[in-house]
Amino acid sequence: MDDDTKLLNLALDAGEIMLTSGAETYRVQDTMLRILSVSGRKHVEALALSTMLIASLPREEKGPLSMARGVSDRSVNFEKICAVNNMSRSFVAGKITLEEATQKVLEIHYAPSFAPWQRILGYALTSGGLTMVYNGTFWDGVAAFFIGTLLGIMTYIMSKRKTSYFFSSFTGGLLTGLLACLFHLILPFTQIDMMIVGSIMPILPGITLTKGIRDLLEGNFISGNAKLMEAFLIACAIAAGVAMALSIFPNF
């Protein structure tokens, strides 16, 4: 494998890690261009879309060398984004070689993420805490804590099975609504609306919405509109799940 191919693979690997970790497409594209600029050639190209990365290096002798890669996974890991940014800056500054940069990217890719119990605990604490922030009672917060725990378990299982975002969001809204109604049956003094509002907070597409707006402001209209549509569909799926749960308990 020649150096041009290695450089393209490095740019694509770095872009893939950033895109799957929750970075905006304009930031991904900027990092890829920065890495490709080390070649010293003019008119290097990098394109980042919501589900695809494309990188190209011009070559006078053999013609341009281009590579593309599809991206389907989604998560949120700002630590990996920062690690890739630091790697790219060190590589462009000449502090590390191409081989060292490739090794660092592999280390970042295989670095352990949050453990399942940490994610589930995050769901529980977010649900319970925000319920009380939104003027819910102590018992509303306790109920939302347990709802968030079950929601976190469900989300983790569905992510492992590669379930579609729409279906997992719908199921999350349905589970939240059903559990809130059941808690109200057991503890009549709890407030269903407070439990539902607090519990669905971890699955709301806030980050997706923010990334879509930022991409639009940076002029990436395709990726920006795609993210806004994704956020809209996720929100609709959650609302549909909650509505179905409440329709099962019409007296509430």
Image (cartoon, rainbow, N blue to C red):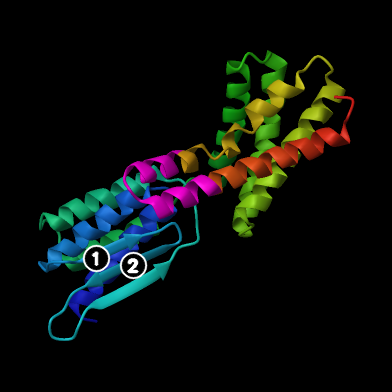
Instruction: Note whether 191 is above or below 243 in the view shown.
Output: above
Q: Are marks 2 and 1 in contact (CB under 8 Å)?
A: yes
Under mark 2, the amino acid is: Ile
| Residue that carries the numbered disc 2 in the rendered image | 54
**Which residue is at 65% across, 30% downward?**
199
Return the mark for residue 237.
Answer: none
Q: To which quarter of the image does residue 241 belong?
A: top right
Q: Quadrant of the N terminus?
A: bottom left
Residue 66, picture quadrant: bottom left
Q: Which residues are magenta?
A: 210-229
Number of other residues with Cα within 10 Å of mark 1, as a class: few under 14, some 14 to 19, many 20 or more: some
In whole angstroms, how far apart are the C-alphas of marks 2 and 1?
Answer: 8 Å
- State the SS at label 1: strand
Q: Residue at x 44, y 38 (%)?
A: 210
- Position of 243 with respect to 251 (left or right) is left
Q: Is residue 219 magenta?
A: yes
Q: Using residue 136 as the reference point, say whether residue 222 is left or right of it.
A: left
